[in-house]
Amino acid sequence: MPVIVIVSGKASPGATTSAAALAWAWPSAVVLADCDPVGGDLTAGWLSPWVLSGWLRRDIGVLSFATATRHDSTATAGSLTEHLQAVPGVPRVRVLTGLQQASHAASVGELGWRRLAEALAETDAAAIVDCGRLGPGTPWPLAWVADLVLVAVRPLPRHVIAARAALAMLRRHVEPARLGLLACAARTSTISSLEHALDVSVRAELPEDHVAASVFSDGMDEPFGLSRSLFARSARTAASRLAAVPVASEREQRAEEVGSDA
Ligand SMILES: Nc1ncnc2c1ncn2[C@@H]1O[C@H](COP(=O)(O)OP(=O)(O)O)[C@@H](O)[C@H]1O
Ligand SMILES: [Mg+2]
């Protein structure tokens, strides 16, 4: 099943919100991995009601996986299982909760991200991986194994400029066939101008909808009729398209390289 990595540029286009909405709308089993190196937002956002009520634990996730596997030279899908938690009410989604603070990234380290990349690549379920804003702490091993790396962008000049810079950095690590755009808060009429400005195809789009977005960014109650809204329908369309992304034939080889360089 495909591994889809989502990153953003300098602005805050809606990467985490979109990752959560795509997982919620995913047609089959999916792992939603919060790998933002400066600290994950999912447990304080979409999943916050479940954290507050004690159904989800923030101490089981990226850091517990990295710690538990720290003596292993490679990681398997099995080594990840106990660090995943089913999302209440959306049982197809298992979450790998993110770092609680930026300083924890040092404990994961490059080798911890490599093991996680290997384990996600081996997992039976698809994976949506939120890697946050590109920067010095970016967990590159996840982008190396990804079947598709999406740059989240809004159709606004400052977002396009931020995405352009992100793409310039990404192109040094990821070949063009594995790069795409995730258009956030976008109208269909703006898609072609985004593609034109950035010279990359839009692979998923979500419309502007503050109420629906606040469910996935802040854990607000689902509004009546959410699942029939344009936002939800777009999320389902995008999720089905992404779920059908072929697993890149050379992924196994890339995952092995990621492991063997370690
Ligand atoms: N499709 C959308 N329509 C309206 N608002 C959105 C949409 N997607 C995200 N947002 C809002 O944008 C803000 C930033 O979202 P977030 O996902 O945290 O950004 P990022 O992860 O890129 O930093 C949040 O307030 C969220 O509710
Ligand atoms: Mg984010």
Image (cartoon, rainbow, N blue to C red):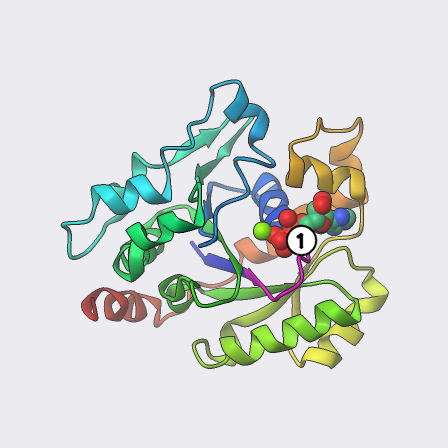
Left/right placement of residue 39 relative to residue 107 reads: right
Q: Where on the picture, by quarter, is residue 196?
A: bottom right
Q: Residue furthest top?
A: 53
Q: Residue at x 67, y 81 (%)?
A: 199
Q: Is residue 244 visible?
A: yes
Q: Quadrant of the C terminus?
A: bottom left
Reading the image, the residue beneath label 1 is 14
Q: Residue furthest right?
A: 189
Q: Between residues 17 and 237, which one lies in front from this camera angle? A: 17
Image height check: is 26 above or below 110? above
10 Å crowding of disc 1: few (<14), some (14-19), many (20+): many
Does dot 1 land on a helix, a strand or a loop?
loop
Image height check: is 90 above or below 206? above
For label 1, being within 8 Å of ligand 1 is answered yes
Left/right placement of residue 37 relative to residue 83 reads: right
Name the residue type under label 1.
Gly
Image height check: is 229 above or below 57? below
Left/right placement of residue 66 relative to residue 137 reads: left
Q: Residue at x 59, y 70 (%)?
A: 180
How many numbered marks have been drawn onto this rendered protein structure? 1
Q: Residue at x 30, y 34 (%)?
A: 82
Q: Is residue 239 visible?
A: no
Q: Residue at x 27, y 47 (%)?
A: 66
x, y percent for residue 184: 71, 57
